[in-house]
Image (cartoon, grey):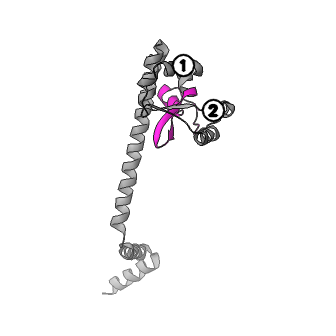
Amino acid sequence: MNKAPTDNPSERIENLIQTIRDQRVTVDVDLARLYGVKTKALNQAIKRNFERFPSDFMFRLTEIEKSEVVTICDHLKKIKYSNKLPYAFTEYGAIMAANVLNSQKALHTSVFVVRAFIQLREFVKTHQQFVSKLNELERRLEGHDSVIRSLISTIREMTDPVLFEMRRKIVLRD
């Protein structure tokens, strides 16, 4: 999941967004780093305002999910030995976290976090449209194999120099 470093904050943040449970999320360690606070401070602010974080804003990873995240993301190796399961924040949860932290850096950075989520959403949408068009094309061409082969054969005959010369000689004799 790690890409080459970039100067664009939204692109750097995109590298921290993962898909877990079919949702795009960022884990508490990364969100805390982005917002310029310690993970412990972020999680304390979340606990104080827990009613602001329904399940579509945030959820706790399972042991298996935590293990997968650590395996996939080199920068998260530190959480491997933590006895606490990390939280995963959706786009809405990341915005709410910035609000409950109420720091200038968190509020400023949350704009880039939202933009990164939006860019990923657009990428997925474009990718899905491309796959849909490709499937449509494949359906249209189904059964046309013999026609396409015949067309290619005809084109090859037309471009074959030996056959071209034979046709030319035939035409010249008339």
- Residue 15 coordinates in the image, percent (x, y): 53, 34
- Residue 97 in view in this figure: yes
Q: Quadrant of residue 38?
A: top right
Tell me which amino acid carries mark 1: Gln
How many marks overall? Answer: 2
Q: Quadrant of residue 150?
A: bottom left
Horizontally, is 63 left or right of 14 in the view?
Answer: right
Give the residue drawn at x 43%, y 74%.
156
Q: Residue furthest left?
A: 174
Who is closer to the viewer here, 66 or 73? 66
Q: Is residue 90 above or below residue 132?
A: above
Which of the numbered marks, if any, corresponds to residue 76?
A: 2
Give the residue drawn at x 45%, y 75%.
160
Q: Earlier in the sequence, mark 2 or mark 1?
A: 1
In the image, the segment drawn in magenta is 1-29
Residue 132 drawn in magenta: no
- Badge 2 local density, few (<14 within 10 Å), some, or many (20+)? some
| Callout 1 secondary element | helix
Who is closer to the viewer here, 70 or 142? 70
Q: Residue furthest right?
A: 81
Determine the CA span between mark 2 and mark 1.
20 Å
Who is closer to the viewer here, 105 or 68? 68
Tell me which amino acid carries mark 2: Leu
Who is closer to the viewer here, 86 or 2? 86
| Callout 2 secondary element | helix
Residue beneath label 1, please? 44
Which of the numbered marks, if any, corresponds to residue 66?
A: none
- Residue 152 coordinates in the image, percent (x, y): 40, 72
- Residue 159 coordinates in the image, percent (x, y): 42, 72
Instruction: Classify the position of the C terminus by image quarter.
Output: bottom left
Instruction: Classify the position of the N terminus by image quarter.
Output: top right
